Amino acid sequence: MNQLLQDRLRPGEKVLWQGHPAGIRLMDPAFRLKNLIVWSFAVLFAAAAVWYAGFYAPAAGIEMGFAAKVSFFSLALGGYIAATPFLCRRNLEQNICYCMTTERMIAYRVKGETIRFQSRDYVDFAEASVEYLASGKANLYLGPKTFAARLELLNELLPAREEDRMMPLTFASIVDIEGACRCLPTYIKIDGFARSEPLRRAA
């Protein structure tokens, strides 16, 4: 276990399970909608660049050197937007770690001597949700599987804020969904679990 994570644990708190995102498929139904929206914006920027340089600028008498610069900037921005889902996937698979403790669900990222840390206490939630993926892996939500929570699946891990305490926390594309669910207290109802519910610890 990373020492920075160990230092953030509460007195008596123990880590029961650890994992990380793996094998994320960007066109899996769980991730597809957000990525299609992102790529649609990239196409719009590319189309705008072609329209501006090829049609608007000549008709408006705009100097072609300036038009070329504007179009290049628009194309570059569109290219960056198009690459964003791939960059997010790489960041998740290479940098984000998950753990389940006796008290809470934790997602964290270690960078050098600092740690970015998000956690949710089990006692603040009455339900968890499992979403199976085409890859055979699964997403785990502590809290309901809302539309907003699904859109956050591939996002960068943000610094913890007090107002996020009651918002769902998600583990994206984990291999050992049974092991993670086994760590949840029995008072948390698990929605979407395809097999018989794993033996879980008492609260």
Image (cartoon, rainbow, N blue to C red):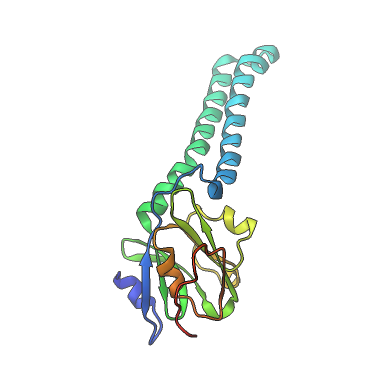
Q: Position of residue 69 (x, y in %)?
A: 53, 23
At horizontal 52% and vertical 38% (from top left) the residue drawn is 81
Say whether residue 71 is visible. Answer: yes
Q: Position of residue 73 (x, y in %)?
A: 53, 29
Say whether residue 157 is visible. Answer: no
Quarter the N terminus occupies: bottom left
The image quadrant that residue 35 belongs to is top right
Horizontal side, residue 56 vs residue 152: left or right: right
Query: Seen from this angle, which residue lies furthest right?
Result: 60
The image quadrant that residue 51 belongs to is top right
Total numbered labels: 0
At horizontal 42% and vertical 72% (from top left) the residue drawn is 100
At horizontal 45% and vertical 72% (from top left) the residue drawn is 198
Horizontal side, residue 149 vs residue 21: left or right: right
Q: Nearer the viewer, residue 19 or 42?
A: 19
At horizontal 35% and vertical 53% (from top left) the residue drawn is 94
Q: Position of residue 38 (x, y in %)?
A: 57, 40
Q: Is residue 168 above or below residue 104?
A: above
Q: Position of residue 118 (x, y in %)?
A: 48, 68
Query: Seen from this angle, which residue lies furthest front?
Result: 196
Q: Nearer the viewer, residue 200 or 180?
A: 200
The image quadrant that residue 37 belongs to is top right
Q: Is residue 43 above or below residue 107?
A: above
Q: Nearer the viewer, residue 60 or 199?
A: 199
